[in-house]
Image (cartoon, rainbow, N blue to C red):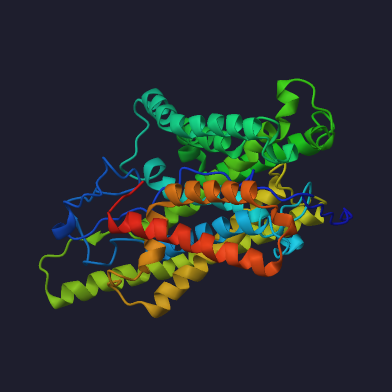
Amino acid sequence: MSQKPWRRRHNPTPSTHTHTAIDILPTPELPSSSSRSSSLLSESNDPTSSSEQSPGQVSVPGAGDKLSFLSVYRAHMMIMTVHCILAVDFPVFPRRQGKCEDFGASLMDVGVGSFVFSLGLVSARKLVGSQVSNDNIFLKISQSIWKSLPTLVLGLVRVLMVKGSEYPEHVTEYGVHWNFFFTLAILPVIGISLRPVCQLVGWTQAGLLVAVLHQSALSSSGFNLQSWILSPDRNGLIEMNKEGLVSLPGYLAIYLLGVAIGQHVMRAAAPAKRVESATEKAEERIKRHYEQRRANLAMELVSFGLGWWSLLAFSRFMGVEVSRRMANSAYVLWVAGYNTLFLLGYLLLEIYLLEIPVPPHAVPPLLDAINRNGLMVFLIANLLTGVVNLSFKTMYLSNYQAMCILILYSIAVSAIAWTARYWKVNL
């Protein structure tokens, strides 16, 4: 099939509408030595911590305490995002890196999908594993709904604030009332609901199946959702928010693929089998265990990455263009491939630069602070972005003025994250 020309239309006026806060969970804490088993970061106060360790397992102190490469990956993603959401409002920011209106791929287009993929990564421990069962599934769904209520409330608050202050926004991103908070509130609930099916068919297969069905609905003559989304008509509540509703299956596919990758990441950090004594030979055996697990994970990420990019090339050959607005199959595969290979890069750096056991301070303190308090950092960044846009006519500022504001903004966000880390605040 002939390939359609690549079309890129950028949003005419930059805004921070699509870069809304997410329930950004800290990198999972993994089983460590018995001396740290009473850590304050237990299951009760850290939903992504892992305090389970079977009696027949043991680990080297520092070897599996934290996935350092995952922490750095998530922190760098956060830093890139919080800078872009303000920088895009200044002329100094390259227009080609701004969000594409209908079709296309740019730096800011990958941000939203990366958040969803990252959420799937850190949600893997709760959705996958021997400790997870499908007993009382309806109770777990209700618990997931309850935990998603704060995110839903934030979405409602954002709607009221944006409409009340007449803050500039683009309805073609999510719709008139819908915003990314609502998408984030719904995804974990759907993930819990689909867990029995996903465990049966596989998380990767489930994610790809959702992407294929979603693309079929977009392209088929029967549904033809793509033409409906691209049309300017907005009559009624559903049509006013058609982008947010129609893109939801695409983000669900990204979330499921993130869980699939997270399943392999968590498996690589699983403790080694217990040895009879803590002799030097035993320590070496466990060290080799973690080294082999990380090497296997690297090969798995290479395989996944090649698979995602190959499928993306096939989608492009079939005429499917990347569209963040619709979260179509090409966008799903692009986000999955981008994040998988980036995660592989951080893992390779850890393998070749850090020895087992990984040093306790392998993650730089500032990056650790940003990763641990991602939700707070992102909320503060959005708040400061709004203050700057209401205080200045950002599109008329010189490059020098823009850079001064961006530097002060970066210092403020970093200082808040550092202060939270100093006072041991984890949100």
Asked if residue 104 lies left or right of residue 132, the reply is right
Q: Is residue 252 above or below residue 419?
A: above
Q: Name the one closer to the observer, 82 or 309.
A: 82
**Residue 206, percent across and down?**
56, 41
Q: Residue at x 37, y 56 (%)?
A: 267
**Residue 285, percent across and down?**
23, 72
Q: Name the one closer to the observer, 359 or 394.
A: 394
Asked if residue 66 lies left or right of residue 32, the reply is right
Q: Please, which residue is most extreme toward the top here?
A: 236
Q: Is residue 367 above or below residue 285?
A: above
Q: Residue at x 57, y 44 (%)?
A: 20
Q: Is residue 207 visible?
A: yes
**Residue 22, percent across and down?**
50, 44
Asked if residue 157 lies left or right of residue 8, the reply is left
Asked if residue 255 lies left or right of residue 17, the reply is left
Q: Residue at x 55, y 29 (%)?
A: 156
Q: Name the one closer to the observer, 204 or 388.
A: 388
Q: Is residue 226 above or below residue 378?
A: above
Image label count? 0
**Residue 113, percent across and down?**
60, 49
Q: Is residue 137 above or below residue 120?
A: above
Q: Please, which residue is most extreme toward the front here?
A: 391
Q: Is residue 190 visible?
A: no
Q: Residue at x 46, y 51 (%)?
A: 121
